[in-house]
Amino acid sequence: MNFSHFPDFLPEEPETPVSFFFEDVAFDLPDEQALREWLEAAARAEGRPIRELNYVFCSDEHLRSINVEFLDHDYYTDVITFPNSDYGPGFSAGEVYISSERVAENAKTYGVSFYHELCRVMAHGLLHIIGYGDKTPEDEVVMRGKEDYYLAALEA
């Protein structure tokens, strides 16, 4: 029997590949469309177009509970990523959880605006989804360089 006439069934591509959700926090996310376009352009520049990427903004406690439950890490962090390979190799897909409280604290520490730090963490999450790591000093240098590059493109 020849089944070549049946299409390959991949997950349906969402209307907007980048979505933003607020779990237990609320703040204004300025110009969501510009952020979507920026993230999509960064992923394309890395050769990994976005098929579906969800950003979930939440509290420190919510993100810590995710860290404990899924990663067995009992500490606060600003971002956790969960890549999704359902679309196959060469695409970016997954979920990025961001603590807006940790972002606000980091912004104060580094002397930057909340929005600037939020965008840095969003880029960081995307880069993890694409496959970049930051566990070694060498990987961290590459990650920071990519973050700076894409932040500069957003601010241009």
Image: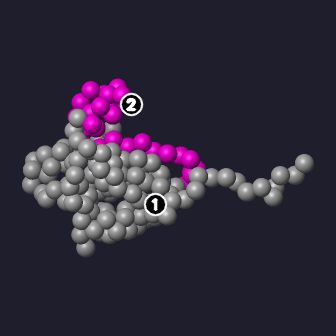
User: In this view, which residue lies farthest toward the right?
Assistant: 1
Which label belongs to residue 17? 1
Q: In the structure shown, which secondary structural element does the residue marked by tag 2 occupy?
A: helix
Nearest the viewer among 54 and 121 is 54
Q: Give the amino acid at mark 2.
A: Phe
Answer yes or no: is residue 14 visible.
Answer: yes
Amino acid beneath label 1: Pro
Residue 38 visible, this angle: no
The furthest residue to the bottom:
156
x then y, percent, for residue 105 = 13, 46
User: Residue 117: x and y, percent?
Assistant: 20, 55
The image quarter in which residue 147 lies: bottom left
Residue drawn 27% across the image and 51% down it:
121
Q: Position of residue 95 (x, y in %)?
A: 41, 47
Q: Is residue 86 above or below residue 75?
A: below
Residue 51 image point, x, y percent:
50, 58
Q: Are marks 2 and 1 in contact (CB under 8 Å)?
A: no
**Residue 79 falls left or right of residue 116:** right
The residue carrying pointer 2 sits among few (fewer than 14), some (14 to 19) or many (20 or more) residues within 10 Å by Cα, namely: few
Q: Helix, strand, or loop for circle 1?
A: loop
Q: Is residue 40 left or right of residue 61?
A: right
Residue at point 58%, 56% (across, down): 12
Say which mark, if any, is on residue 70: 2
Residue positioned 20% across, 55% down in the render: 27
Q: Is residue 80 above or below residue 70?
A: below
Q: Which label sits on residue 85?
A: none
Q: How is the image coloured?
A: one colour
